[in-house]
Image: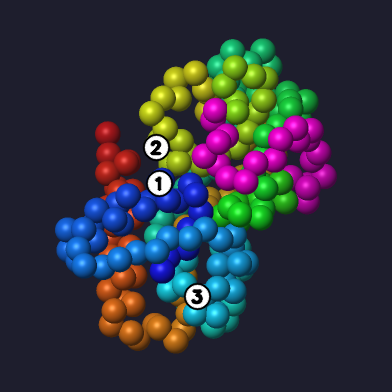
Amino acid sequence: RLSMSDAMSVEALPYIIRRIRRSAPNIDLVITTSGPQEACQRLAEDKIDLAIGVFPHIDKDLISGELYRDTLICIADKRNRRLKNGRLDLKSYLESPYVTVGPTRDTGIQLDEILNSMGIVRRIVAAVPHYLSVPSLIRGTDLVAHTRRRLLSVFRTTTDLVVFAVPIPMKVPDLEFIQIWHRRYDGDPGHRWLRDLVSVSVRSNTKSSRAP
């Protein structure tokens, strides 16, 4: 019983499934989607065995293990008239209509909270539940959005989009993707096997995606 976001089900789950089919084909998986807070609650209630994603805060009864890190980036249609040398400066960024990902169902990546803490206000014209829809919403429009660099690589074509750093006067921290589980299963051999399999599956894909 695994919990992960829709984006993670595209980005990481295929590698987990392939390794299970090779090493333990009699294992059955049930995949569900939860936001960070809900996933922690479901672990506490023993409704899931493992949750994967970005979790800003986890309860003291939960244990975590890092899987990989990713970078938050901005994307825009390459024909966007506000672009200069393939990027937006801060002024153009703030003037652009924006697509954002709502906090309810995704992985806890809240650039909006960082910007709000800095007093930076943008016009958000669409708030969507997950990152998978973002590139298709940007194409052919003047909209700007943020996504994850690694996630963008799973789309078949992004040649009509430009990618650039978030143009704010501070470094946006890397995103730490982790798996979390309840302390009651920390020493369980079967659970340890599952955690190790997830870790090896996701990390091997991370290394191959960075290869030239």
Residue 187 vs residue 38, the one in the foreground: 38
Residue annotated with mark 3: 47
Q: Which residue type does callout 1 highlight?
A: Glu
Q: Does 120 appear in magenta?
A: yes
Q: Earlier in the sequence, mark 1 or mark 2?
A: 1
Q: Which residues are magenta?
A: 115-136
Q: Residue at x 46, y 36 (%)?
A: 152
Q: Position of residue 107 (x, y in %)?
A: 56, 55
Q: Position of residue 33 (x, y in %)?
A: 52, 58
Residue 11 — which label? 1
Residue 52 vs residue 133, the one in the foreground: 133
Marks 1/2 in contact by CB < 8 Å: the verdict is: yes
Would residue 1 appear left or right of 176 to someone viewing this image? Answer: left
Q: Which residue type does callout 3 highlight?
A: Lys
* Helix, strand or loop status at disc 1: helix
Quadrant (top left/top right/bottom left/bottom right) for the N terminus: bottom left
User: Gap between marks 3 and 1, in whole Å?
Assistant: 23 Å
Q: Residue at x 49, y 80 (%)?
A: 46
Marks 2/3 in contact by CB < 8 Å: the verdict is: no
Q: Residue at x 61, y 54 (%)?
A: 105
